[in-house]
Amino acid sequence: MTARLRAMGRSVAWHWPAWLLGAVVGLAYFLSSPVAGDFWWFDASRHAMNSVFVYDFFAQGGWRDPIRAAKAYYDQYPGINIGFYPPFLYLVTAPLLGVFGVSHAVCQAVVSAFAALCAMAGYAWTRPLLGRAAACACGAMLVLVPEMALWGRQVQLDVPAVALLLWGVWALAKWLEAPRKRWLWLAALLLGCAMLTRVQTVLAWPLWLGVVALHPVAREQPWRLRLGATALYGLLSLPSVAAALYFAKVMGSLAGRMPDMPALWSWANWGWYAARMPEQLGIAATALLAVGLVVLVAWVAASGQAALRGRTGMALVLGLLAWLFFSVVSNKEPRFALPVLPFAMLASLLVIGHAAAAWPARRLGAMAGVGAQHSANLTASPLASTAASPAASTAAPTAASANAPPATSIAPSTTASSTASLGASPIAVAAVLVLFSAMVVEAWATHRWTEVPRVTGHREAAMLAAQLAPPDTRVMISAHRDGNFIFSLRTLGQRPDLAVRRADKLLVDMTIMRQLGIQDRGLNDADIRALLDRERVSVVVAQSAYLADQPSMQALDRLLASGCCFELRQTVPIQGQHRSDETALRVYVRRP
């Protein structure tokens, strides 16, 4: 056991560039993120509030009567939607809230850590082929693209799910390269946790089933191992599947025909995400995909070999599965296809690395008769053979030792061994570093790391409401970003006696988003006055012109403006990257 721990320590120490990369990326993401209740994306505050709910649930003993506790919590803070989303991110964040305090900063720090894991995954995917320096550049490239930089700095599920997908598929590829059962169990665990983070990662299931059931290497492994790992993956997937079935009506509306979205079998639908890739990736990363595609076509034409096996093939297949899945779903946003981007980039980087390493060997092989064997080693399925060719291993140049792990670390794969034995191709390394430099310059020129969207005003309104509301009363919020207000009221911690009422729940009937339908409840001024009395509302925080086309919301505005029972105490401006109809929050206090 001591020897194994020492070996693991040496292996971890040898990969110090990956740890340094993760630390730099995590800090860069965190330090440039909104962390003061100034959530930009309307759903981000709800994800943060879900984590707070999980923490409060256990800290306050809610597990003794979970249903009653959950209902009471939602009655006080109607800004949670944990039943609609899988709970993994919230379960990870809750203990940290207990240690460091309940705040936006802690929730964002967890997402920043997952962004760091994305970069480290890029290193792990490419290090055997490209060496440590270029692998660090590859990892950094994954998190420099605009789409990743945007959603990694909001408390959203997208980046954590991508990180778990990257590491889960990497572990699956590692199992094929070196079929030890721990890699398969790790892959099942990570992919299952991805499902527990975001249900859309179900797109990885076809890859899992195809590899575990049909791959020649997998079929040589014990069926009990493969069945057990599949069962673990399935067990971890069940909560997400159950939630999707429970909300089948809403899910069906999102997956089916959405307003303003192209028809399923139209060119516009299947090209929707491709048309947005330059915006998602930026110029340099789009150039990377173009170069990778050109190199792939040229490689296949010159060698007559597929060149898409092993890690390269897995990255490409997962990227294609993600693109297919999100193209079928009618509800489209650029962020939904976030899993496509890192896997497409990894496939391009690996194709470039393999081609740059193999083509010189093919030219030499025409004279020495060894190039063809080397090319086959580079492009063969990871366990098509059990060891690298003796000729390749004995011909290893001095540069290879710089890229090979210590002898005590985990044995590398066949493909990785044959590639590392020749060292990383200088052409491939140079190409990667040039593309990485271009991405850094582009990020600097476009102010990607300084202009992070955020919206302020709701925290200030929550502080004011906490000061003005009498004990054991309720505050009504009528605003598009009501989640920002509710989160701030809870995390300020000054008024645990207050409860919140949402106008868009009491005055209208709206399911998730307006596009799915909204119905006015038909309340007049007198009805709303009676409702406010019955709910013991002492403070109303109202966004100007929120849902202004709904009669009941118009009645609320008339009642507040009349001064009959509430007086305007202060107007808080809404600032930042917000919608045009979000201008200010008016804080009203009930008259004595």
Image: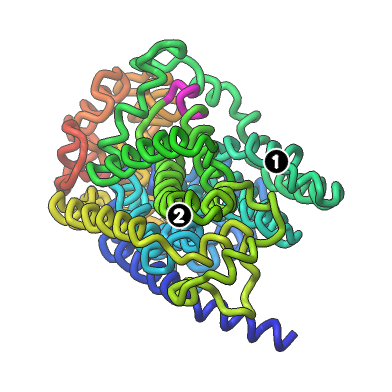
Where residue 121 appears, as percent x and y from the top left, is 48, 58
Q: Is residue 197 visible?
A: yes
Disc 2 packing (10 Å; few <14; some 14–19; many ≥20):
few
Q: What element carries label 2?
A: helix
Q: What residue type is labelled 2?
A: Leu
Rendering colour mode:
rainbow
Q: Residue at x 44, y 33 (%)?
A: 301
Point out the tag, 2 or 1, that comes first from the N-terminus.
1
Q: Residue 238 carries which label?
A: 1
> Disc 2 marks which residue?
364
Vertically, is 36 above or below 455?
below
Q: Nearer the viewer, residue 134 or 164?
A: 134
Contact between marks 2 and 1 (CB within 8 A): the answer is no
Where residue 369 appears, as percent x and y from the top left, is 55, 53
Q: Which of 280 and 4 is in front in this view?
A: 4
Mark 2 and mark 1: Cα distance apart in space: 53 Å
Name the side, left or right, on which 271 lies relative to 451.
right
Vertically, is 525 above or below 237?
above
Q: Nearer the viewer, residue 539 or 19?
A: 19
Q: Does the magenta stretch include residue 535?
A: no
Q: What residue type is labelled 1?
A: Leu
Looking at the rendered image, the quarter that the N terminus falls into is bottom right
What residue span does the magenta drawing correspond to? 325-331
Where residue 115 appears, as percent x and y from the top left, is 41, 58
Q: Residue at x 50, y 17 (%)?
A: 256
Q: From the image, state whether disc 2 or disc 1 is nearer to you.
A: 2
Corner quadrant of residue 467: bottom left
